[in-house]
Amino acid sequence: MSLAHTTVLLWAWGSLQAFEIVEKENIFQKTPCPAFLIFDNAAYLADMSFELPCHCKPEEVSAVVWYYQKHLGSSHTKVLTDFDGRVLTEAAQVRVGSDMLVRFSIRMFSLLVFRAQPEDSGLYFCGTRKGDYFYAYDVDIQSNKGMVATFKDKGQEPSEDEHRGSLHVFTTFWEWTPCDRCGVRGEQWRIGLCYLQSPDLSPRYRKTLPDVVSCGSRAVPRRLRDASRDHTPELMVQSCLVPCEKVTTRKGMLAIFDYVSKVGSRPWVPQVPIQFHQQRLGHGLIISCPGARPEHAVAWDKGDQHLYRTEYLKGVSRSMRVFIDHGNQLHIRFTQLSDRGIYYCWRQGVRVAGFRLAVTSQGHYQFSFSDPETRSALQLILLGYLLITAVFVTIHLCRCCCYLFRCCPNFSP
């Protein structure tokens, strides 16, 4: 009994130790704020969303205020807060061309900017409502207009580095995206942004490498910034092939239920949500993939046709009526009757949505037998007609049999 009691006490003590509550470490107690404000350099491509964490602040400060200046020492400063640090904006609510004050959010002392534009480039300060600054960023939003595309399958190489005396201009590439499709040939790409190296940079800006910052940084003197203006961001594309994840088959009663549900289903059931859109003939159209960002691997299909970037990327040809821009959106400059069909969207290698496009002429909708839902409706109508005909014929055959064999009474007057 003594041994049993000892075992129980040890087990109870171990359980209490296992469920001990550990207080979360406060990073602000171990990260002192710099005595002299220094700006961290960060570069992004236009239409991207990014987060700027406030890495340090006094412990007694419970809410931070974010400030924005176009240039250091500018008299015009934007206040990006409601002075309580509780501004919340959802990315789905942000539209292209929205004002900067609508495209930001503050969460846990961090500043989130949605769909950033080149005019958002500048200096961002984390501080208090009294104007005390703790941490600062030098943000460079590079435009995707004139972006150079390089296709590795065609043997193309990225742009060469530029050397102009002590100035070195080059492209820094991000990591490759995942394959945008599975089971078939897909594509993957990586974004390259403009960077430069020079000993003439301002020492007040923090660099990842010695004397290296993005081309649009405020640490770059105006004369050097003008010299690197022609070096645009780049996009490198290559083919890829990855298998799709296998769907696990269920056993027992679940397998029987799946079989019965498939047998009883309608002739055509979409595998992804399908959104219907009706477009006037000759008008332009832009389709966006739900939940996709410019840095995501996004692909487009029209039915069984794969719209590869090697043929449909913006800038490949000057006379493109249907193309994919650098923000992963599908553009149709002026719709034709041949554009009718279902456009599928892939995101990060998974097909996530479909858009059924109907083209109308003078306000009248024109049905197409190539539309699977139209074919399904016609099949249901034909099946109903055949069922009613079969019932009608069966009833009259029964009445005829009853009359011939005198098994039924005569209902005639």
Image: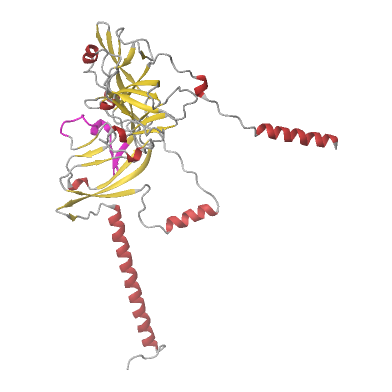
Between 84 and 399, the one lying in front of the other is 84
Mark yes or no: residue 303 visible.
Answer: no
Q: Name the residue: 29% across, 34% down.
A: 328
Vertical comparison of 328 with 392: above or below: above
Screen quadrant of the N terminus: top right
Q: Nearer the viewer, residue 383 or 374?
A: 374
Residue 365, x across and y down, in percent: 20, 55
**Residue 89 shows up from this direction:** yes
Q: Residue furthest right?
A: 1
Which quadrant is the C terminus positioned in?
A: bottom left
Q: Residue at x 81, y 36 (%)?
A: 5
Left or right of 220? Residue 29 is right
Residue situated furthest top in the rendering: 165
Chosen colour scheme: secondary structure
**In the image, residue 313 lies in the stretch drawn in magenta:** yes
Eyeballing the image, is 191 above or below 283?
above
x and y percent of residue 21 in the render? 62, 32
Percent x, y of residue 24: 56, 28
Foreground residue among 382 and 108: 108
